[in-house]
């Protein structure tokens, strides 16, 4: 059998892995199994599309032809029903069997089922675009990135909005209470009030859910891969606990040697970094993704940047510094700086990311 | 060493401040006070900050710029061959 890399998942981690393998080892067969029919699109651009900043066609990052041009066999619109690690075989929902030399799980995340609108896929965005002209108001359940996007969408379309948050404020597992209060006041200034999650309607035409998207690990579990930290447990090199099975992107909880723990990171930069590193490794050039990643968002004009590991549960100490409207929050694990959040202070990013990068150098 | 001229542009309306371009090619991109990426010329900003510049790049430097452009989640980075007008990315 010719060397074959099978990749499950057609998002940025999966596609980048496929392309990097081909770049390093053009002779290797690469099969990409994508549950969606549409070619790769940017989930990050979906709010832009909903807010009419770009036409729908502009969300796509690849054309259907681009895969074949790079020698990647894309299987579109099919799901994997089973992985057989002993036979190194993947079975699709149409009973097709594909043998692999190495298997990559880039299965991403999925929002929890709900009665309202979610925003994960292009189909979700299409449904929201269709619904918005008919809505009188938005009821937004959640206090994280998606809820933030929904608040921005409500403002764009001049829809009154209420936000229902568990635990008091936005990003309550990340931000200290004082910072949550700053965001709450900012929202209130724009006419958006935060309510307790228990007060959220259970049915309403304008109900939007941003309550988190767990990693999709069911295939990994069925294949016998261990899980950790809410994701598929991997080494630094993204190898799972099953031989010849790797994981990349939002679903992977990779070992972080300088943190001494596995960490699942759900942002674009991390998914891209994983794809590049794993693709190079599987293409014969072993590479480890070591740089801390960052993600930025905008809450009604307030910039918020998250860098490194910013889970409060992982930090032994938080230190918040306010300088007028600018806020810097430092997350320490013992003496090591492991994460930073910047509110309204984007110019501080470069130096602090470099400081985090220093913390992350493997010893 | 052979070089070519490119027009390197960041569309600030599309830029969301992910800074993947800066991470990939810090000689060509830097974040500004509005959390948008601006374009540098080999690490410098001649004439002040700008979202668009004409750069003279080697083949290797062009590869770095294209890789940075490809890393942008919103395709806010546009690379054009200044001599032929051909859009190299996206």
Image (cartoon, coloured by chain):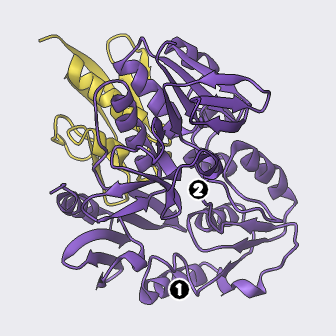
Residue identifier under label 2? A215
Mark 1 nearby-residue class (10 Å; few <14, some 14–19, many ≥20):
some
In the image, residue A58 above or below residue A192: above
Frontmost of labels 1 and 2 is: 2
Residue A197 horizontal/vertical position (percent): 70, 83
Q: Residue at x 60, y 78 (%)?
A: A190
Residue A346 horizontal/vertical position (percent): 33, 63
User: Of helix, strand and loop, which one carries label 2?
Assistant: loop
Q: Is residue B17 left or right of residue A218?
A: left
* Letter of the chain shown purple in the rendering: A
In this figure, what is the number of numbered marks?
2
Q: Is residue A310 left or right of residue A34?
A: left
Q: Alpha carbon of mark 1 to alpha carbon of mark 2: how far? A: 32 Å
Q: Residue at x 49, y 15 (%)?
A: A70
* Letter of the chain shown yellow in the rendering: B
Residue B22 horizontal/vertical position (percent): 29, 45
Q: Which mark is residue A185?
A: 1
The quadrant of the image that shows the C terminus of chain A is bottom left
């Amino acid at each position: 059998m010719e060397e074959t890399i099978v990749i499950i998942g057609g998002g940025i981690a999966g596609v980048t892995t496929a392309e990097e393998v081909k770049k390093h080892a053009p002779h290797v067969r690469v099969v990409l199994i994508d549950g969606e029919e549409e070619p790769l699109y940017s989930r990050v651009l979906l709010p832009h599309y909903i807010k009419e900043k770009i036409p729908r066609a502009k969300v796509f990052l690849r054309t259907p032809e681009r895969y074949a041009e790079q020698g990647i066999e894309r299987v579109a619109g099919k799901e994997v029903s089973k992985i057989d690690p002993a036979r190194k075989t993947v079975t699709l929902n149409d009973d097709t069997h594909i043998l692999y030399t190495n298997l990559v799980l880039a299965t991403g995340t999925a929002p929890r089922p709900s009665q309202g609108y979610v925003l994960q896929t292009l189909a979700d965005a299409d449904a929201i675009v269709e619904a918005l002209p008919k809505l009188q108001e938005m009821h937004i359940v959640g206090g994280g990135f998606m809820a933030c996007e929904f608040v921005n969408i409500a403002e764009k379309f001049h829809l009154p909005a209420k936000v229902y948050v568990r635990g008091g404020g936005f990003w309550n597992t990340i931000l200290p209470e004082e910072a949550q209060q700053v965001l709450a006041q900012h929202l209130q200034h724009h006419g958006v009030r935060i309510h307790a999650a228990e007060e959220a309607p259970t049915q309403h035409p304008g109900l939007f859910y941003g309550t988190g998207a767990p990693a999709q690990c069911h295939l990994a579990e069925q294949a016998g891969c261990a899980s950790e930290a809410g994701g598929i447990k991997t080494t630094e090199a993204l190898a799972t606990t099953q031989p010849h099975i790797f994981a990349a992107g939002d679903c992977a909880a990779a070992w972080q040697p300088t943190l001494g723990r596995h960490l699942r990171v759900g942002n674009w930069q991390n998914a891209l970094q994983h794809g590049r590193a794993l693709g190079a490794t599987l293409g014969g050039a072993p590479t480890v993704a070591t740089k801390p990643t960052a993600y930025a968002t905008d809450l009604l004009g307030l910039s918020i940047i998250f860098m490194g590991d910013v889970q409060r549960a992982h930090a032994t100490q938080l230190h918040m510094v306010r300088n007028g409207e600018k806020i810097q929050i430092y997350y320490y694990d013992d003496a090591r700086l492991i994460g930073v959040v910047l509110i309204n202070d984007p110019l501080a990013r470069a130096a602090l990311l470099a400081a985090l990068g220093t913390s992350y150098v493997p010893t | 060493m052979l070089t070519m001229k490119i027009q390197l542009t960041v569309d600030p309306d599309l830029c969301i401040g992910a800074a993947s371009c800066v991470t990939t090619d810090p000689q060509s991109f830097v974040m500004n006070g509005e959390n948008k990426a601006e374009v540098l010329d080999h690490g410098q900003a001649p004439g002040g900050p700008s979202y668009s510049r004409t750069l003279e790049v080697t083949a290797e430097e062009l590869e770095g710029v294209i890789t940075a452009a490809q890393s942008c989640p919103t395709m806010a980075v546009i690379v054009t061959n200044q001599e032929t007008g051909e859009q190299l990315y996206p």
